[in-house]
Image (spheres, rainbow, N blue to C red):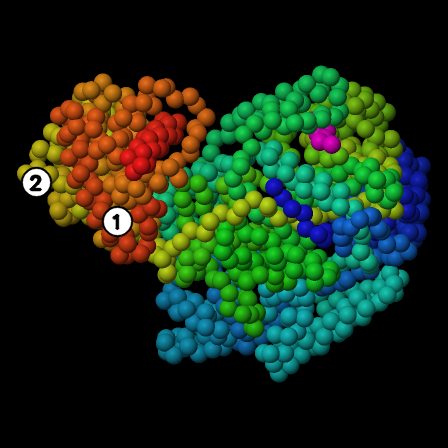
């Protein structure tokens, strides 16, 4: 299912768990004596220079200066002192987490080999860069000083709403976010946006504005352009794209290009930036942690002089020298773990919001239709964004308790009743939890993050280890991407070669700034693939890449994907960092990055679903793999409140922990953060109590036991492994070049076009009566009845869709009156409940454009007449309507493709087995009726059968014309269209019923098989 890559990335704590540990403070009392103990603990902790340096980098000078003042004898209230001790304790415990964070934890290179190897006697070194918030303040100052000289581009995430140009989400001016920005869309603004796409400077845009609007003053033109820059509508080249790993280097380079040294106010800033750049390089070139510590002091002081309000001003990554080697058995178990997560996916058909969106797309535009992304996502012109997206106007699909939820509830409850902390996932239990494992395509690439528990390297090499899944990042390079600049070229190439879902797809790297400026520190990744820049300046020397306006959305009956409008190739955007989509990403970016895998089994860490809020969840183990650690939810309401004395609270807490069998070593989880706690220590219980005073629940999960990290020197760690799917890729969909898109005004509106599209809602059991007895009475009102066809549908309630093609738009008034009066009579007889007139949206992606579509609509009309005769035949001859429908499918397939090709299509495209038993009499009748090789002998025996054969012949003539037109236009092949025609024919006969449709197609295949066998026997 998945193949693990040959190289991985380790996330490792800087120090072993017991390094630099001091006796924990007593946080249970509130007396002056307690305060003296807290002060003493701070003094002891602050003697650990490595801890001080790590806290200074992580929290900035504010916290370290406050602690230093207390250690030096400063006066502070007991309440504030206790709070300070808690903060330092949390940072000290943070050293027991492997997630890279300043000097606390870093990364190392990993290979898989025959036996394990861990570098000894080495220390990690820091690699510093300027902090994003610090740099943002500098850039804002420089944009004010240099605005006329700055190259700018228009922000491609802006949208037009009424008379305003809106940037729906952008970082706030103080570095927070997100906020909305908008400006009035004047003619001048429109022209600026057009010119900004040509690589102009603000000064050149000012000149062009004054040329076009000579009555406007230079001051007002400058003010307008400055406003556009300030609001993010125009993006200056000073702001580095997210593919620039060193944004300071980018900034200095642009300043040199625009000759900032010619502007007096910018000269000292440029000089300071060059000095900071030299200091950063000096720091990164030092060969020891002590030398780097000294260099950082000089560097931070200089940066604070330049931007005092930005705090620390520096961000640091930690890199372990050398390479770690892990045995191949770990790699094999990682593959197995990923396969288990996929099999046990909570959403094997994709997220419900995407399934809902896919259904809306197919219903509105039809399968095969291509819609420009910008048109589709604008709710004024298209569907807008999927449900649960920021700014979406679609309702969230109702959540239902699934069979999987029920089984997981039972599993968890059984474990609780049996006092079992662990559940073994054997093959029988896996089959019970996931009986219908999807055999089709799955996410093409991903990562898995694992903790490796082994007491020593020798035990690890012997296979005596346990892998605990700690994360399932969404795609290749999600976790590793931001550290590729610290790893070798091989790691970069490995990330570049991660496979796409579809054959021939263009893999594209999305580069976009997060909606919170600070997050830029952890989301910069070098360009690995062709880059799609969104909401950012691509850089002065950026190569032309894929643009947002180059992309369209397409869908078939199963999936959605992006296409390049110029050549029709599928496009698969990737976000090669861990940027969280829901809260810190523009929703357009999220859409582009999620659509490719939206309807494949969702790859994620094990999800308990609705059972996830139970107070206890057992550990799930499969062999050497722990898919999910045991977890407990401790409600604050179960314990005494904050006013209770410590002994009372501690007693109640320990009773709860004992009752629920919570182990001593746990992680306290809060959102994506995990704090390691030793519940045997009162100080750690105090941290737990402090958490419960701010949160309604404490989520605790079991942590590695002491000694589990022995193979890596006692350090907390996680191994991130890239995964590539081993399943066949989806075949590439062919599109005409350039791709035709469905325009927002493509639908035929009632009264403004020669189309009348009516929906008649009511009991589906009365549809046949309406079609046979009442539809002819409607059509008889015309001397020359219009072209018409019908479909049964269920969207919004069961209804009959009736479409009439009128001679001209002016004929709509009379036609509407006739249909309305006809519907009134039907309602009076209890046959319908209501009528609505709707827009007719031709499915051009499914059936073709222009002349091909005209012929397809004639086929729809002929097929509707044919279906009425087939229903009459079934009624008059007392034949199962499913057998008649199967014969109709055979006639349709052979009519479109000719006899041999039509029968072959049915044999090749319809599954041989459907998983249910078919009645022998039904099977035999379908085979006799579908006897194409025998000239439909049984149908010729009755008058109604002969009428049906004449209708089939008329439809076959139209099908031949349609096939030839498709060949002339070259957009679609008749064999590609046949499946859709067969589907519509079945829906006209039976309504929308997937089970019945599968059965009828199976019967048609049986008839085709029998016909081929008879032909073969005759040839002998």
Q: Can I make out residue 642 in this image?
A: yes
Q: Which mark is residue 784?
A: 2
Is residue 619 one of those drawn in magenta? yes
Q: Is residue 705 magenta?
A: no
Which element carries disc 1, helix, strand or loop? helix
Circle 2 crowding by C-alpha within 10 Å: few under 14, some 14–19, many from 20: few
> Closer to the observer: label 1 or label 2?
1
115 above or below 305? above
Front in this rendered view, residue 96 or 601 = 601
Residue 19 placement (x, y as % from top left): 90, 47
929 relative position to 372: left or right:
left
Which numbered disc flags the more N-terminal residue, 1 or 2?
2
- Going by the picture, which residue comes out furthest to the top? 417
Residues shaded magenta: 617-623
Q: Which residue is mark 1?
A: 963
Q: Residue at x 51, y 65 (%)?
A: 545
Q: Horizontal placement of 136 versus 586: left or right?
A: right
Q: From the viewer's perspective, is residue 533 above or below residue 555?
A: below
Find residue 431 and report its horizontal and vertical position in percent: 60, 26
Q: Residue furthest front?
A: 1020
């Amino acid at each position: 299912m998945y193949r693990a890559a040959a190289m991985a990335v380790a996330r490792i704590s800087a120090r072993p768990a017991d390094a630099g540990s001091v006796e924990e403070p007593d946080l249970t009392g509130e007396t002056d004596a307690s305060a003296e103990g807290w002060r003493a603990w701070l003094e002891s902790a602050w003697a650990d220079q490595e801890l001080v340096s790590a806290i200074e980098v992580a929290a900035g000078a504010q916290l370290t200066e406050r602690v230093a003042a207390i250690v030096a004898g400063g006066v502070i209230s007991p309440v504030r002192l206790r709070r300070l001790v808690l903060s330092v304790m949390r940072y000290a415990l943070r050293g027991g987490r492997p997630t890279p964070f300043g000097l606390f934890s870093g990364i190392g290179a990993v290979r898989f080999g025959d036996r394990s190897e861990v570098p000894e006697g080495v220390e990690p070194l820091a690699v510093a860069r300027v902090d994003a918030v610090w740099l943002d303040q500098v850039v804002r100052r420089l944009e004010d000083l240099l605005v006329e000289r700055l190259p700018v581009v228009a922000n491609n995430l802006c949208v037009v709403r009424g008379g305003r140009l809106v940037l729906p989400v952008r970082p706030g001016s103080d570095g927070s976010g997100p906020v909305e920005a908008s400006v009035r869309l004047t003619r001048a603004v429109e022209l600026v946006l057009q010119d900004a796409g040509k690589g102009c400077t603000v000064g050149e845009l000012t000149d062009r504005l004054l040329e076009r609007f000579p009555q406007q003053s230079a001051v007002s033109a400058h003010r307008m352009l400055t406003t556009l820059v300030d609001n993010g509508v125009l993006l200056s080249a000073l702001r580095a794209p997210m593919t620039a790993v060193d944004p300071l280097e980018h900034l200095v380079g642009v300043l040199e290009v625009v000759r900032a040294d010619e502007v007096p106010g910018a000269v000292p800033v440029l000089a300071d930036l060059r000095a900071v750049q030299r200091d950063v390089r000096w720091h990164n070139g030092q060969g020891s942690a002590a030398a780097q510590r000294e260099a950082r002091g000089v560097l931070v002081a200089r940066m604070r002089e330049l931007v005092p309000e930005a705090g620390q001003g520096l961000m640091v990554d930690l890199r372990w020298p050398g390479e770690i080697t892990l045995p191949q058995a770990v790699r094999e178990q990682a593959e197995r773990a990923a396969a288990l997560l996929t099999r046990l996916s909570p959403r094997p058909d994709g997220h419900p919001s995407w399934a809902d969106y896919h259904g809306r797309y197919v219903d509105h535009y039809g399968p095969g239709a291509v819609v420009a992304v910008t048109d589709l996502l604008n709710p004024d012109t298209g569907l807008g964004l999927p449900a649960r997206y920021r700014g979406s106007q679609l309702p969230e699909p109702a959540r239902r308790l699934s069979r999987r939820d029920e089984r997981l509830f039972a599993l968890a409850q059984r474990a609780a009743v049996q006092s079992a902390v662990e559940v073994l996932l054997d093959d029988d239990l896996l089959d019970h939890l996931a009986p219908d494992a999807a055999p089709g395509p799955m996410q093409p690439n991903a990562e898995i993050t694992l903790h490796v528990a082994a007491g020593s390297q020798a035990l690890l090499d012997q296979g005596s280890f346990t892998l605990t899944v700690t994360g399932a990042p969404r795609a290749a390079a999600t976790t590793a991407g931001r550290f590729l600049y610290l790893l070798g070229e091989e790691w970069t190439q490995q990330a570049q070669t991660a496979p796409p879902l579809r054959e021939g797809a263009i893999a594209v790297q999305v580069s976009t700034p997060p909606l919170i400026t600070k997050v830029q520190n952890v989301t910069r990744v070098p360009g690995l693939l062709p880059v799609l820049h969104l909401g950012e300046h691509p850089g002065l020397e950026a190569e032309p890449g894929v643009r947002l306006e180059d992309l369209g959305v397409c869908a078939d009956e199963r999936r959605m994907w992006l296409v390049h409008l110029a050549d029709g190739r599928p496009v698969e955007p990737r976000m090669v960092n861990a940027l969280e989509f829901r809260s810190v990403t523009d929703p357009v970016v999220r859409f582009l990055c999620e659509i490719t895998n939206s309807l494949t089994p969702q790859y994620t860490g094990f999800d308990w679903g609705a059972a996830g809020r139970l107070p206890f969840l057992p550990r799930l183990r499969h062999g050497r793999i722990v898919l999910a650690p045991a977890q407990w939810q401790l409600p604050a309401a179960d314990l005494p409140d904050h006013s209770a004395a410590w002994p009372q609270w501690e007693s109640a807490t320990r009773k709860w922990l004992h009752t629920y069998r919570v182990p001593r070593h746990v992680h306290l989880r809060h959102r994506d953060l995990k704090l390691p706690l030793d519940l045997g220590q009162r100080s750690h219980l105090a941290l737990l109590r402090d958490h419960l005073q701010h949160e309604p629940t404490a989520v605790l999960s079991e942590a590695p036991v002491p000694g589990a990290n022995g193979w890596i020197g006692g350090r907390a760690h996680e191994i991130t492994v890239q995964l590539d799917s081993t399943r066949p890729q989806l075949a590439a969909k062919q599109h005409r070049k350039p791709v035709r898109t469905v325009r927002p005004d493509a639908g035929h509106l009632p009264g403004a076009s020669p189309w009348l599209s009516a929906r008649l809602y009511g009991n589906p059991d009365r549809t046949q009566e309406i079609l046979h007895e009442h539809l002819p009475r409607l059509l008889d009102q015309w001397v020359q009845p219009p072209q018409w066809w019908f479909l049964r549908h269920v969207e919004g309630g069961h209804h009959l869709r009736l479409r009439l093609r009128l001679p001209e738009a002016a004929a709509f008034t009379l036609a509407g009156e006739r249909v309305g009066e006809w519907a009134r009579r039907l309602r009076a007889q209890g046959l319908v409940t209501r009528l609505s007139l709707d827009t007719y949206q031709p499915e051009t992606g499914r059936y073709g454009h222009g002349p091909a579509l005209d012929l397809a609509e004639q086929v729809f009309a002929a097929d509707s007449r044919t279906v009425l005769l087939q229903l009459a035949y079934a009624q008059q001859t007392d034949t199962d309507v499913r057998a008649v429908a199967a014969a109709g499918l055979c006639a349709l397939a052979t009519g479109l493709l000719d006899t041999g090709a039509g029968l072959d299509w049915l044999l090749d495209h319809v599954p041989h087995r459907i998983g249910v038993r078919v009645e022998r009499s039904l099977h035999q009748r379908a085979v006799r009726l579908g006897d194409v090789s025998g000239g439909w002998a049984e149908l010729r025996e009755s008058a109604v059968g002969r009428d049906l054969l004449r209708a089939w012949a008329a439809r076959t003539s139209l099908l031949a014309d349609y096939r030839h037109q498709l060949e002339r236009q070259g957009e679609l092949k008749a064999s590609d269209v046949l499946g859709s025609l067969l589907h519509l024919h079945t829906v006209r006969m039976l309504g929308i019923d997937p089970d019945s449709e599968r059965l009828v197609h199976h019967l048609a295949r049986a008839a085709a098989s029998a016909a081929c066998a008879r032909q073969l026997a005759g040839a002998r």
